[in-house]
Amino acid sequence: MAHTSDRLHIFALSITPSFVPSTGSLSPQLSVRNAQFSTRWEDVDDQRAQVVAVTLANILPGSYATSLNAFIDSRYEISVSGEGVFIIAAGLVYRLVPADQTRVDVLVFNNNSGTGNATVMIKDGSGNIVGTSGGWPIVPLQTEWIVDADVLTTHETPTWWNQAKYGIL
């Protein structure tokens, strides 16, 4: 095969902000990117509280990162509700700059192996609701593990492992 050098490769990239703020007061624009009922749990009062991993994003463009009003700099609380789902411990976010996202763990009891859809609610430090996002599927907590590849591939690493900082002093 002969090597030719007469090829032209053109690459293009377009960047479009996901949110363009209106003129006036600027505040964080929060979006729930994902809410996943995981196979992880924490022991709470001798019961397994299921971990719901919520991905929260501040969808303001990064160019607004220098504006003090454009990012979260105080406590925000993330909770999850739905049929058969009861909040045990809300997720907390203390800082989120424009164009950034974070994952927050919310602990819930999932009675009757709750089904249907859940709603994620975001409250600011004053308790005001600043956003809701619904339609997230409720998945029961996997409590029995059997020797089956389909079941075992859903197993996730425990919370303590995800939060570990091995080798970092």
Image (cartoon, grey):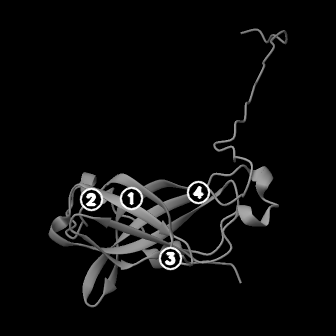
Judge whether 48 appears above or below 113 on screen.
below
Whole-percent x, y for residue 35 in the image: 41, 58
In this view, the mark in front (2 or 3): 3
Which residue is at a point 58% across and 57% down the rendered structure image? 57
Residue labelled with disc 4 = 57
In this view, the mark in front (3 or 4): 3
- Tell me the CA gap for discs 3 and 4: 19 Å
In this view, the mark in front (2 or 4): 4
* CA neighbours of label 4 inside 10 A, class few (<14), some (14 to 19), many (20+): many
- Tell me the CA gap for discs 2 and 1: 8 Å
Which residue is at a point 71% across and 9% down the rendered structure image? 1
* SS for dot 4: strand
For the residues bearing labels 2 and 1, Cβ distance under 8 angstroms:
yes
Residue type of the residue flagged with mark 2:
Val
Residue sitting at the far left:
112
Of marks 3 and 4, which one's residue comes earlier in the chain? 4
Which residue is at a point 76% across and 24% down the rendered structure image? 11
* SS for dot 2: loop
In this view, the mark in front (1 or 3): 3
Residue labelled with disc 1 = 36
Residue type of the residue flagged with mark 1:
Gln
